[in-house]
Amino acid sequence: MQIEMAYGQKGMMLDVPAGIETTIIRRKPLPVPDDPARVIEMVLANPISAAPLSEAARGAKTACILICDITRPVPNRLFLRPVIEQLTAAGVPLSGITVLVATGLHRPNLDDELAELVGDRWVLENVTCVNHYAREDADHVMLGTTPGRGVPVGIDKRFVEADIRIATGLVEPHFMAGYSGGRKVIAPGVAHHSTIRTFHSARFMEDPAASSCNLDNNPLHEEQLEIVRMLGGTIYGLNTVLDEHRNLIFASFGEIIESHMAAVDFVRDSIEVRVPRKFGLVVTSAAGYPLDRTYYQTVKGMVTPIDILAEGGTLMIVSECGEGIGSEEFRAAQQRLVTLGPDAFLKTLLKKDFADIDEWQTEMQLKPMRLGTIVLVAPELSEQDRAVTGVECHDDLNTAVRLVLARTGLRELAVVPEGPYVVPFYEAAE
């Protein structure tokens, strides 16, 4: 049996040996609209729990539109110009409009990559398109601390001070915050490093509720909502949902919290997949381009299927990792993991109020490591980078599958071709 796995921009074929029982876990298909531009037009005309943008923008002089960074395949080309045209029709000058890339603590997206991200030459040529830099103190307004957990809140002043504020993004499963998009594009998207490092500390990450597809009592989600409330006023959200072929299948627009929940409610039944058993071998992906460009982002694909991984089992993930390991801070965290071991590494995290930058991704890697063995298939990853992954590495997917089957004696496996965009949950058959 051949199964195409998400890998880079071209995919990779998994050839399951004959006689191996294979369970393929995919999202439930949803209809694809014939005219995605019309979808955007309709949601802009019918905002959820907010005034039409054409009304809200009257008299406004400035607007800030947040977009996700290059790690998310958001179809910005579909909606940025229509949104900007609505703003200018209401009297907002082009010179007062900023498209701000919500990088969080990721690297900036510049030059050709920025052009790819924005996806519309007209937008690049007519409004300011810039990156957020979380470590630049002067770029932020400090708003105090959240009432519940005391998170220090700093947000990019270009967003805080704009007359019209719009956060755009992709609603998909997120292995810490439950679902991406909406409030998450603000924090961590355009938050100060102290904000990000606080709610990515171990006291948040080790909370069982900080998990894929869960918003109930999720500490990250709750703090993100608090930050939205602290900002005050109306913040708009434009949310998109894509299918596994990156077609737009849904969009919502309106008040940021309500419009985000509309997108979450739409997509839940499709991507949360109930599975009646656990498996000794789960083969998955890091979701392909652009998410699988680094090992840092690959960790997401290791975490999302662990509910169906049997204790002591093997989780195998394929990822291009064409940009290598990720940031130098992440490399340092991974090196500490390899040197100290998982238990000692976690103990160092539990002592901190502020997480070191990017070490939270290493902490998330501990979750599948507690269950079993991780096998990484990343033929483009260098030996130097492999040495700090802390996992078993291979060049060829099919060779790696055969090796695991041979050493475990397993005659069945589960395959999640789309990686972290689909989340399987174990639910015992009645």
Image (cartoon, rainbow, N blue to C red):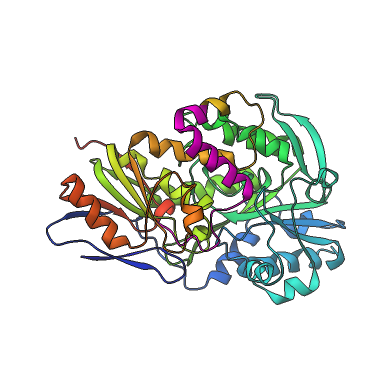
Image coords of residue 425 (percent x, y): 33, 41
Residue closest to the eye, 119 or 333: 333
Characterize the magenta stretch by its predominant secondary structure. helix
**For this view, does 330 lie left or right of residue 397?**
right
Above or below for 53 versus 195:
below
Total numbered labels placed on residues in the image: 0
What residue do we see at 37% from left, 61% from top? 395
Q: Quadrant of residue 125?
A: bottom right
Image coords of residue 201 (percent x, y): 60, 32
Residue closest to the eye, 46 or 345: 345
Any magenta on residue 252?
no
What residue do we see at 72% from left, 43% from top? 191
What residue do we see at 71% from left, 51% from top? 51
Q: Quarter of the image containing the N terminus?
A: bottom left
Residue closest to the eye, 130 or 110: 110
Residue closest to the eye, 416 or 107: 107
Q: Quarter of the image containing the C terminus?
A: top left
Q: Quadrant of residue 399?
A: bottom left
Magenta range is 318-346
Q: Residue furthest left?
A: 19
**For this view, does 327 lie left or right of residue 417?**
right
